[in-house]
Image (tube, coloured by chain):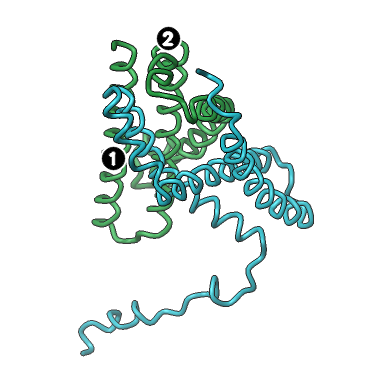
Amino acid sequence: MADTPQRPVARTRPLSPHLTIYRWPVTMMTSITHRATGMGLSVGAVILAWWLVSISNGPEGWQGFHAVSDTPVGLVVLFGLTWSLVYHFLNGVRHLAWDLGYGFAKQTAERNSVLIFALSILGALAIFAFTWTGHGGYLQ
Amino acid sequence: MSTAQTPLHKVQGMGSSHSGTGHFWHERVTAVALIPLSLWFAYVMLGLAGTSEVTALQFLAHPWNALLMGAFVCFTLWHTYLGLQVVVDDYIHTAGAKIFLMLLIRFSVIATGATCLFAIVRIAAL
């Protein structure tokens, strides 16, 4: 027993209070969402690879991709990726502004957090509305 | 003062973290590069939405578009690698699991990038 006195201590060491204790400020939400959208976009990069390969495989490849992407689940995933990219883009620009020393004031940071959530949802909706109203496909 | 540090280790000034600001800086450089590239990517995705594979083929076969798509893929995956590395650093605290996940992320990112670049070259050669 007394041979390894440090063993049980390592498991029971106290943690300072964090996620479960404090009220979640909106800046915390934007920080966590930035990480979550980044992880989601990592999966999106694999889907981008699949899309490029499907194009290189000619008509059958293209149809194979669209057989999945045109389903309701596929559209939900694409909408999620669209919103993630818009969000990560906007909040990423804010991170670069922070690196330059701008936007740290408490009120500014909170206002910008709400603004980024709102703009990212509006941006993703606008992108989908743009194509659904027939304005997409202008590269044809 | 006597020290166990080698002169090289001392002049590098990295301490126990083994690295300096390189990771932070590369994350920022790739982020800045991705601002115009992401806007271009969004323009392309909207422009190709609802078209046929012929349109996508012809568009990506154009040298400038192939180069821009290649740059977008490279910077995206480099940025992805740096970002996922931070996630592992933050949440995984055992050396074995950490090395395993770091290798998995690195290999996955390289495999995804190689696949994208090969597809882009193949489209241009079709």
Q: Are marks 2 and 1 on the same chain?
A: yes
- Residue A126 vs B43, above or below: the answer is below
> Which residue in the protein does label 2 denote?
B63
- Among the two numbered marks 2 and 1 on one chain, the one whose residue lies closer to the N terminus: 2
Left or right: residue A72 compared with residue A65:
right
Left or right: residue B38 compared with residue A56:
right
Which residue is found at the position 51% from the left and 46% from the top?
Answer: A79
- Residue B40 vs A80, above or below: the answer is above
Letter of the chain shown cyan in the rendering: A
Front position among marks 2 and 1 = 2
Badge 1 sits on which subunit? B
Hey, which quadrant is residue A63 in on the image? top left
Left or right: residue B30 compared with residue A50:
right
Query: Residue B92: x, y in percent?
Result: 35, 59
Q: Determine the colour of chain B.
A: green
In the image, B121 versus B31, the foreground residue is: B121
Query: Residue A103: x, y in percent?
Result: 74, 46
Which residue is found at the position 26% from the left and 38% from the top?
Answer: B107
The span from disc 2 to disc 1 (Cα, nearest Å) is 27 Å
Left or right: residue B7 compared with residue A126:
left
In the image, B31 versus B111, the foreground residue is: B111
Badge 2 sits on which subunit? B
Dot 1 lies on which element? helix
Q: What label sits on residue B49 in the rendered view? A: none
Hey, which quadrant is residue A62 in on the image? top left
Quadrant in which the C terminus of chain B is drawn: top left
Q: What label sits on residue B108 in the rendered view? A: 1
Dot 2 lies on which element? helix
